[in-house]
Amino acid sequence: MQLFLEYLFDGISNGAIFAALALALVMVFRGTGTINFAQGEMALFTTYIAWGLTTKNVPVVLCLLIATAAGFVLGAVTERVLIRPIERRGLLATLIVLLGLFLALNSLDGILWGNQNYSMPSLFPNSVSSFVTVGGARLYWANLGLWILVAVLVGAMFQLFNHTRLGLHMRATASNRESASLSGIPVGRILLLGWGFAAAIGAVAGILLTPLTPDSLGVGEMFPILIQASAAALFGGLDSPGGAVSAGLLMGIVESLLSGYVPAIGGQLQEAIAFVAIVLVLLVRPQGLFGSKEVERV
Amino acid sequence: MTMSREPSRAPLPLLINQGSAVHRSLQIFGVALLAGLAILGSRTNSFQVGLLTEALIYASAIAGLNLVTGYTGMLSIGHSAFFGIGAYTTGILVSEQNWNPLWTFAISFLICFIFGLIVGLPALRIRGINLALVTLALAVAFPEIIDRFPGLTGGTLGLNVNLFQLLPPHWTGIGIQNRFEYYYWIAAFLLALVLVLCANLTRGRTGLAMRATRDREIAATAVGVNLAWIKLFTFGISAAVTGVAGSVFAMYLGSLSADSSFTLTLSITLITGLVIGGVATVVGPIIGGLAIIYIPHWTEGLRQGQTEGLFFGTILIILMFVMPDGLMGLLTRLSRHVVRVKPRAPEGTSRAREGLLAGQDRSATPDSEGKGDTTLALS
C-alpha cells in the first residue's frame, strides 16, 4: 500500500506536468492547427531563466512570475514573427519552422548555460524532511504544491475558455477562423494570446517539475516530456483541452505504476512507451478519447 | 515579366523540345559533368574523400526523405531512425553473421521498407500532422530502444565492426590504406542509383499521384489517386532508401552508437539539408548533403555541437522564409529565363495539351510541373 501510494504520488506529479504541457499543445493546435514542437524547448528556456535568477538570490516566487511573463512573450513573439507569416504556406512549412525553432532554442540553452545539469530550488519547502505521511507513504510538499498550482492553473484556463469574452473569442477562432474574423473578432490578437498563454503554462510546468529531481535541469530535460505530453494530447483528442488534461494525468499515473511494478518495460523505455501509445491511438481512435472527428469540406 | 516574353522580341528563354537531340545531349552532358566531379572528388586527399563520402551518404538519405516530405508533402522527423535501422542491420549482420557488407544492403532495404510501412500505417489517418508526431516519437525513442538491447546492438557502448570485414575486396585494387576511396565509390554508386530511382519514380504516374496528394488530397482522390496506397508506398520506399544510406554509413564509420549518430538532431539536419538543396527536386539532395557536411566544416567555429545546432536551426527558419524552394528552386527559377524545356505533347491530344501548357506558362505561381521540366535539363 505504501509503495503503491508512493508510485501514485509520483505519477500524479508527472501526470500534472504532462497535463499542463498537453493543454499548452492543445491551445496551440486549436488556434493554429499545428503541434508546437518547440513547446518543450520554450518551457526549458524559461526554466533556465528562472534558474539563472535564483542563482542571483531572487526569491523563487518572483522568478516564477518573471519566467512566466518571459514565456508569454516568447510564445506571442513566435506566433507573430514566425508562425503567422509562414502559416499560409501550409502545414509542412509551419512544422519545419517549428522544428528549426526547436533545434535553435535547444542549442541556445546549451550555449548560454552549458552542458552540465543543475538543481533548481523549489517554490515549496523541499528538504528531505518536508513531507506529510499519508497511509505510510511520503507526500512531499513540493509534490503537493505542484498538484495544487497546476490544478489552479488548469482551472483558471478553463474558466477563461468557458466564462470570459476572450475565451469565447478563442473558441470561435478555433472552430472557424474565417467566420470568427467576419464577426469582428480580432483573430490575429486571439492567436497571439493563445500562443502566449500556452508558452506561459509551459514555463510554470517547467519550473514546478525541475525541483522534484536534483540535477535535472539540463538541455535534454524536455525532449521526453514533450513526447509524452504529445501522446497525452493525442490520446485525449488534439482539440479537446479537457481530454488532454485527463489523458496527461492518466498517462503519468499509468507510467509511474508500470515502471514501479514492471521494471522490465518501465523506467528505461518511457519514450518507447509514448511512441507505442501514439501509434496505437492513431490506429484505433485517431480523434482521441474526447476529440471531435475531423470533417473536411470539399 | 509577362511583357518581355513575347516571342517576336525576346530571344530568351531558348526553347528546347523534350527528347530532341539538343535536349538529349544536354542531359548526357549533365550526367558526364556529375561523373567527372565524382572522379575529381576521389582524387583528393583521404580526409577530403572521407568528408565527401559522408556528404554522399547523407545525400542519399536526404533523397529518401525527399520522396515523402518533398514530393508527397508529409513531414517525417523519424528518418534518423530509419538511417539507424539500416546502419544497425549492416553492423549486426557483418559483425555477428560474417556477411559481406554489400549483401546486407538488400536486407536493409527490405527491413526499412517494412518498418516504414508499419510506422506509416497509423499516420494515414486523417492528417499530415499525425505522421510528424509519430515520426518525432520514433526519432526520440530509437536510441532508447537500441540501448535497451545491448546483447544485439552493443547498447550504450556501441557496436564495433571488425575492420577486416569492411576492407575493399581484391578485385577493386584498392589497398587498405586507401579504403576510404572504396567507401567513397560505394556511396557515389548508391547515390547515383538512388537518384535514378527517385527521378523515375517521381516523373511517372506515381510521381504525379504523389504531388497531387501533396497539393490537394481531396482533388487527388477525386481523380482516382489511391491516397492510402500512395502515402504508404512512398513512406516505405523513402524509409528503405534512407536505410540503405545508413548501411553505407555503417560501413564507412565501422562503429555505431545510437546516442551520438542517430538522434533527433540527425533528422532535423536531414530536413535542413533537404530545404537547403530544394524540396521536390532530383538534384537538391546532392546540394543538401554537401551543405550539411561542408557548412559546419568550413565555419570552424561551428564545429562544437551546440553552435552547429543553433546555426542549422536558424538557417532552417530563415530559408523557409526567404528561399523555400532551396538552391535548386532558385537555380531553376533563374534558368527558366535562359532555357526552357518544352515537354513533349502526348500522342493524340497535342492541341488540347498545348493550349493547357500555354495557360500554365502565364500563371505566376511556380507549379510543380514547371519545376520538373527544368530538373530534367539539369539532371
Image (spheres, helix red, strand yellow):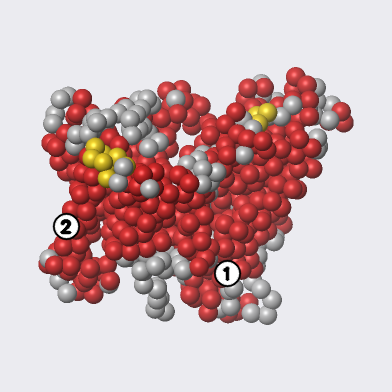
**Which quarter of the picture shows residue A120?**
top left
Residue B213 visible in the picture: yes
Q: Residue at x 76, y 30 (%)?
A: B166
Residue B273 percent across, percent down from the top left: 51, 42
Q: Depth check: give the residue in front, B14 or B305.
A: B305
Residue type, mark 1 in image: Ala
Secondary structure at badge 1 equals helix
Residue B329 visible in the picture: no
Q: Chain of mark 2?
A: A
Report how many numbered discs are placed on residues in the image: 2
Q: Residue at x 49, y 76 (%)?
A: B219
Vertical relation: B93 (above or below) B367: above
Q: Which mark is residue A156?
A: 2
Q: Depth check: give the residue in front, A156 or B263.
A: A156
Q: Nearer the viewer, mark 2 or mark 1?
A: 2
Q: Which mark is residue B228?
A: 1
Vertical relation: A243 (above or below) B300: below
Q: Chain of mark 1?
A: B
Residue type, mark 2 in image: Ala
Secondary structure at badge 2 equals helix
Q: Residue at x 63, y 22 (%)?
A: B47
Residue A201 percent across, percent down from the top left: 24, 49
